[in-house]
Image (cartoon, grey):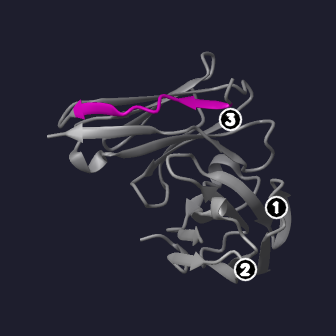
Amino acid sequence: QKEVEQNSGPLSVPEGAIASLNCTYSDRGSQSFFWYRQYSGKSPELIMFIYSNGDKEDGRFTAQLNKASQYVSLLIRDSQPSDSATYLCAVILLTGGGNKLTFGTGTQLKVEL
Amino acid sequence: DTEVTQTPKHLVMGMTNKKSLKCEQHMGHRAMYWYKQKAKKPPELMFVYSYEKLSINESVPSRFSPECPNSSLLNLHLHALQPEDSALYLCASSPSWTGGLNSPLHFGNGTRLTVT
C-alpha cells in the first residue's frame, strides 16, 4: 500500500461545477495535511493545509479531513478553466520525521468550457 | 511570484560536465530542501538542511553534492550525471524542519535539467 494515494485522473468537470479531489494515507498517526497545485512545467504551489477533523474553507477551496477514515479531500467550487492543473496531496507522516512531506502521485483536473 | 529563487531556469549538461544549481530565500527560513521531480511523478525528497546542517540525505548518489553556505543559500553541485538524472529540480524552504503545519514548504520555480 502506498503511503499517500490519489486517483491520477484526469478528472474532468464543466466550468462552474464543484471539483472533488480525494487522497488517502496509510499512517494513522499523521497530523499535517497539505494540498499543492502544480501547473504543467511549473513548481508546486501551496493551496491549503489542514490538521483538524472537519472542513476548512478558503475562498472557493474547502479542505476536508477525516482521520478515522484516513482521507483528506479538496473541494473546488465554481471551477474555472484556470483551475486545470495537477493537485498534489502531501502528508507529514509520523514515521517520516520532521517536515518530511510525502506526496501522492497527484490528480490531474481538467475544467472544461 | 515565488519568494524562493532558483537559477538557472534551464540547464543542459553533458555527462562529463560539472555544474551547480543555486537556490536563495530571504524569508528567514531555517530549513531548505532539494526535491527531484520526473515527468508525471510527484516530487521526491533528496536533501534537507536545517540551520545550515545536513539533516536528511535520502540515499542520493554522490554525483549530487549539496551545500548550504549560509541560511539563505542552498546549492546542488552536479558531476558525472546520467541521462536518467534529467528532471525538474525543486528547491524549497520552510521556517523550520520540525514545525509541521506552522512550517509549510514553499517551492522555488525549479531548474529544468537535461543531461545529454
- According to the image, label 2 marks what residue? B16
Who's the residue at 68% across and 31% down the image?
Answer: A3
Where is residue B97? Give x, y as percent: 75, 57
Q: Which residues are magenta?
A: A3-13
CA–CA distance in space, label 3 to label 2: 44 Å
Q: Which mark is residue B61?
A: 1
Asked if both marks, 3 and 1, belong to the same chain, the answer given is no
Quarter of the image for residue B50 reads: bottom right
Please rate how many residues cluster around mark 1, counting C-alpha atoms within 10 Å: few if below 14, some from 14 to 19, many from 20. Answer: few
CA–CA distance in space, label 1 to label 2: 16 Å
Q: Which mark is residue A31?
A: 3
Please rate how many residues cluster around mark 3, counting C-alpha atoms within 10 Å: few if below 14, some from 14 to 19, many from 20. Answer: some
Task: Give the amino acid at mark 1.
Answer: Pro
SS at circle 1: loop
Q: Is residue B16 above or below residue A93?
A: below
Q: Which mark is residue A77?
A: none
Please rate how many residues cluster around mark 2, counting C-alpha atoms within 10 Å: few if below 14, some from 14 to 19, many from 20. Answer: few
Q: Nearer the viewer, mark 3 or mark 1?
A: 1
Q: Is residue A111 magenta?
A: no
Q: Is residue A73 left or right of residue A85?
A: right
The subunit carrying tag 3 is A
The subunit carrying tag 1 is B
